[in-house]
Image: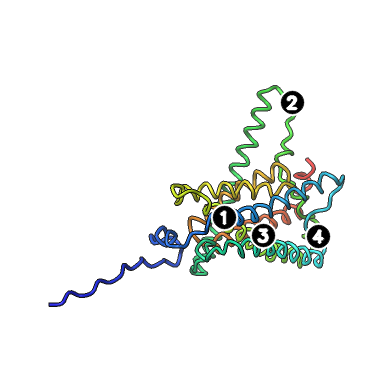
Amino acid sequence: METPPELPPILPSEDSHGLGSAQPELAAAAPRIAAWRGWILMLVMASYPLSLGLIGAERQQGDSSPEAMLPETIGGLWASCGLNFGVFAAFFFVAWAVARPGAEALYLRRSSPWAALGFGVVWSIALRVVVAGMVLAVMGGFWLWARAQGEGAVSLDGFRPKIENVITPSALHDPVYLLMVLTVVSFVVAGLREELWRAAMLAGVLSILPERWQGRRGEILAVGIAAVIFGLGHLPQGAGGVFLTGLLGIGLGAILVGHRSLWIAVLAHGFFDATSFFGLWAADRAGLLKQILHP
């Protein structure tokens, strides 16, 4: 009796949520970027937020009453969104053209839209709770330390993210402007642009790590490096803004590598920013914002 031919091994199928057991095998099967290409990818991507952060910080320091980064008019906001995404697209295209990272390297795997939406909402809430808790813990620790040193009134204003350097709260009174900020700015200019940056940054860092650092340990290191650079890209928001966005970068990076899905990270980021802007609008309408910005 003739022996039947051996069938090739079948990879386990991916689940639609991005959480199946096949993920490590699928990630390992993805072609690795050459190290020299990875260096270029990483350096080009890193230069994008760092240059924006340094330019913005210098502009804020050189102006006694600096304007917010986002224009106050709808036309100006559209122009700003187009310019920001266009500049990023130029950096991204140059880096991609050299390194040619594949879809798996950029976490562009398919997933159920409803699952991505659900995870995005849940993770945005979790990020807000964790980040807010850690920021309050640091501020509380500083306040206790200052009191223990015998200082009188302790100002924590230096730890507050300088949101007024990002957007003029009164501009949110225009419902069209508010809607645009909650959608285009939050989910496209912030969510999609910054998570594409993070995915490319992670791909670059992982490609230059030695073989023994490939896998989960290397991903943790890459997430940390990207988070530091992401935080420094928000220098115009002050030390508090750098710290907060750095923590947010760790959380978003963990979502990206944990689910291996860019779209879940984009939605989590977008919902986080949208609820932040909405909270800013609500606080301003309630008359509470002046007490926060000018204690």
Task: Name the side, left or right, on which 57 lies relative to 30.
Answer: right
Per the model, the C-alpha gap separating discs 2 and 3 is 40 Å
Q: Amino acid at mark 1?
A: Trp
**Which of disc 3 and disc 4 is earlier in sequence?**
4
Per the model, the C-alpha gap separating discs 1 and 3 is 29 Å
Q: Label 3 near label 4: C-beta < 8 Å?
A: no
Mark whose residue sits in front, 1 or 3 = 1
**Which of disc 2 and disc 1 is earlier in sequence?**
1
Per the model, the C-alpha gap separating discs 1 and 2 is 55 Å
**Which of disc 4 and disc 1 is earlier in sequence?**
1
Q: Name the image quarter holding residue 48.
A: bottom right
**Which of disc 3 and disc 1 is earlier in sequence?**
1
* Quadrant holding the N terminus: bottom left
Q: Crowding near pointer 4: few (<14 within 10 Å), some, many (20+)? A: some
- Which residue in the protein does label 1 denote? 36
State how many labels appear: 4
- Residue displayed at 15% across by 77% down: 2
Front-most of 266 and 227?
227
Dot 2: element: loop
Task: Name the side, left or right, on which 234 lies relative to 8.
Answer: right
Task: Name the side, left or right, on which 98 lies relative to 90.
Answer: left
- Which residue in the protein does label 4 denote? 71
- Which residue in the protein does label 2 denote? 152
Image coordinates for residue 24, horizontal then vertical, percent:
41, 57
Mark whose residue sits in front, 2 or 4 = 4
- Which residue in the protein does label 3 denote? 190
Front-most of 293 and 4?
4
